[in-house]
Image (cartoon, rainbow, N blue to C red):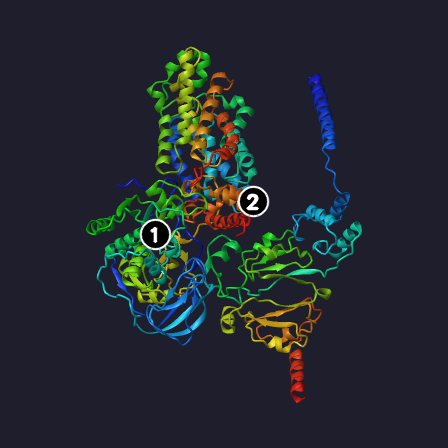
Amino acid sequence: MNSIVIWTIVILAGLGLVLAVVLFFIAEKFKVEEDPRIEQIEKTLPGANCGGCGYAGCHAFADSAVKASDLSAHFCPVGGNEVMKKVAEILGYAMVEKAPQVAVLRCNGTCEARPKTNTYDGDVSCRVKAALYSGDTACPFGCLGCGDCVDACEFGALSMDPATGLPVLDENKCVACGNCVKACPKKLIELRPKGPRGMREAVLCRNEDKGPAAKKACANACIGCGICVKTCTHEAISLENNLAYIDPAKCKLCRECEAMCPTGAIHGVNFPKELDREGIKARVANRKKEVSNE
Amino acid sequence: MIVSPNPHIHANVSTKKLMLDVIIALCPAAIVSFLFYGLSEIAIMAISVASCVVLEWAITKYLMKKPSTTGDLSAIVTGMLLAMNLPPTCPLWVVFIGAVVAIAVAKMSFGGVGQNIWNPALVGRVFLLVSFPTYMTDWTVPAGFISNVDAFSGATLLGQVSILGALEADKLVNLQTLFYNIGGSAGEISALALLAGWVYLLVRKVIRPWITLSIFATVALVAGIFHMVDPAAYTGPLFNLLTGGVILGACFMATDYVTSPMSNWGGVVYGIGIGFIVMMICYFGSYPEGMSFAILLMNTAVPLINIKFHQRKYGRK
Amino acid sequence: MSKITFAIGGVHPDDAKLARGCAIEVLPLPQTMYVSMAQHLGAPAKPLVAVGDKVKTGQVIAEPGGFISAFVHSPASGTVKSIGPRKDLAGNNATHIEIAVEGDEWVEGVDLSDTLVTEIPEDRQFILDRIKACGVVGLGGATFPTHVKLNPAPGSVAECLILNGAECEPYLTSDFRIMLERTKEIVVGAAIMQKVLGGCRTVIGIEENKPEAIEAMQKAVAELPYKVEILPLKKKYPQGGEKQLIQAVMHREVGSGGLPISVGAVVQNVATSLAVYEAVQKNKPLITNTLTITGNCLPVEKMHNYLFRIGMPLSYIAEYAGGVPEGAAKLISGGPMMGRAIANLDAATVKGSSSILYLSEESTKRGQESLCIRCGRCSEACPMGLEPFLLNRLYKVGDVEALEANAAQDCIECGCCLYSCPAYIPLLDRVRQAKGMAMAAIRARAPKK
């Protein structure tokens, strides 16, 4: 009995040893010579293989970065400036700094604001729904609420809010890889600069219908009235196809447009104070008076 | 107003309805086994079905934390098949262990209905067969509701081969064995009841006949050849078709959707494989009844068969 | 019992041709009509009129926007009230010309009489030009411009013209009614197309659940001097699919990505044949079509087959027919297998409109999706021999290469897979996406022109 046990152990151990030696030699023999910097860079990268940089994964990114002549076409959105600084050091290239970005859903058509006009009974997938029709509300531009962006996010930054029917973003988890941007068939998600201390303004609507139609479909819609454009003193807001857009590069975060917007389509986040709607309105009115007096 | 992509109507089949048809198809054989083996068989069936259903419910609820899938009735089918694959004298605690292996190990650990590789009831049965061989090969016949005049006790018809020899054993198969055949697993008792259930499934278009037919054909062919070569050593085709759970296996276990090939030609290959393996085990193996092993082995080959055999595609060679 | 049918897959839904006894009625004109610029396959048409213009019935109001496109004509006489975006039945914006209807004054040169013109023009180009000028498109569902289809690329020879009178979709009876009421016109239309294609064999395939149509057609063919065959077909869905019909009639299979003409076939719907007749023999543009009002929550006496003018809002027709019945949970334009669910009943009818179908909730609501039990029913039902269960899995993991290898691009979107799935997996919803992915991969590889 004992001898069987001993022999089993001896044979298995011997087999393991022989195979290990064989594997070792094969690994040595067929070793692929690679630029050592690729491995170095790969180690500095976050290793999420999310594809947010536009390459197939972290290895492909590193491989391509080593071959490139500068870093203008390479930026890891997950690692951000910190990681890119290290990559630049390894390669000896100049560092190209980028402002950190964050995904912004440009739709605020909550269940409350945007009543359902029919019941969707197909596959729970925005892609399928968008290919079929304009959606289960009267707004043909808004969020379809099937959560393709949530599925696309590999960092768990997005989740569906059953109360609003819209995806919610966890800013701390979002790395601006852009997978959700690609997943949204309505092109509602935009990567926008995170802003100083996270403060930023955006028009959360993409409805290009004329005012009355947009308003009828959704209480939170941008109706293209142009008040924000007239209010903005920094020329940051443009109006096209009945839809306002705030250029984050020009926006000075004065929040005047937000206060003046009649439908509440403009949203500011991470501001330390609550919006003083009445105060700003009075200020804007005064300014207008002054202008007309002049 | 509802809006969805096409099609807007449905054939009105559902997993539940299909499983219900399988349950109905199993009923004749189950009822015959109740008649012949009495209360003990009813108890086995009850324990087996109940444990399968409760186990599946508990696993989906507490371990997988998903909505329960017991509503599709597939656990009842597994429970019935397991009970019908056990000897009528099987102790109830052994039945329960079989149900645990069938549902917890063979079905739910793969993800539930449709995900498993092997037929759960057969995995349960084979587990019991190798773990508790004494209970699993005790073929004494308990008291039934109708008298069992021609009952053998101690060995199944297949078991008689080693006692009486092939020539004598062949003689035991007559018209009566078609109606009832005491000894063996409970569900194997009546070939006719099983075939009636199979025909019901065919009529209801629940299953296609190719797998079952190719098993029967292969068993008959292999047994025919061997029997012709040496009738003294090898039992004949009829004997092999009517004994050893070939009918139960071919009609209800091998045709299990989940563990059989998708295409018709794949099904034929799969059936031939089962027929061949069961005859090899029967003639040359140490277990007299090889159907369970044959089906499980071919279950294993199904992914390969599916890769090789596809539906004929329109406009492609 | 005819045994002629396609060889692979297929399903047998209840044909429910409930409105088969309703003779075609002519709908009166509404006050306002909306003519879509995107009612055919290919590029949308370009409007030729301006707001305020007076138009006559049958007047060209839009020209083709590309090679695969079609002319659009005014369905009534009146004033152009607006040109701009309006929501189609899916709720998406499309350019429509809004016409305030003032009457029904036709343009000159249109033969409005009922007399049957059996003499076919000699000049092939003249026929093609007429078909193009009258804006005829395929009315079997795809609305592919007919003049393009009837003019195959040089080098390809049409060996058989198949007229699709299968009407395999349950409920629909519009083709059946025109085969009964406009029998001879359809046969003349077939003969015209036969002439354009160089006198090839011409077959009208009709499913045998329409024996009256078969009989009427056979009688008409016997009385008219053309070489046209009537072929009764077995009742099986999707018999009217182009590829399936070719397989049933010619025993040939169109290769993946190929056109029917590659096996010498041209398939046209019987309704298209009628439109061709009216265009060529009467110079009448395609501004009317037949539409069935039917469903399983509508009493038979409220069912209708209507001759409608293209541009009438669906809601107007529904209202005229007695309103949306109580208990109608889903409204469908087209058949229950391949039709499109109506999200916006105010949408205007288009050339290809063939029905307003009312389905009750219990007949149309999809069951709860559960796990695949690998029963293989989808694969058995697929008339293209695909394996939807496999494509579903490959789509979920996004393996485009494998999707292409498993012929996702061959899907004809007939719906047989989901129709027969006991687990209610939205197979077609996903296979359609998978098809798009595979086709995009094929297109990306193709050499750029």
Q: Residues within 10 Å of mark 1 (few under 14, many from 20)?
A: many
The chain under label 1 reads: C
Instruction: Check the image and name the residue furthest to the front.
Output: C123
Instruction: Tell me: C412 left or right of A164.
Output: left
Q: Callout 1: helix, strand or loop? A: strand
* Residue picked out by circle 2: C399
Viewer-side label of 2, 1: 1
The chain under label 2 reads: C
Query: Residue C185: where, in percent of width, then height?
Result: 25, 56
Of the 4 image quadrants, the one containing the C terminus of chain A is bottom right
The tally of labels here is 2
Instruction: Tell me: C225 left or right of A82.
Output: left
Is residue B43 at all visible to an observer of this figure? Answer: no
Which of marks 1 and 2 precedes in the sequence?
1
Instruction: Tell me: C359 left or right of B302.
Output: left
* Residue picked out by circle 1: C268
Q: CA distance from mark 2 to mark 1?
A: 36 Å
Q: Quadrant of residue C329?
A: bottom left
Q: Residues within 10 Å of mark 2 (few under 14, many from 20)?
A: some
Is residue C321 at all visible to an observer of this figure? Answer: yes
Residue type pointed to by label 2: Asp
Residue type pointed to by label 1: Gln
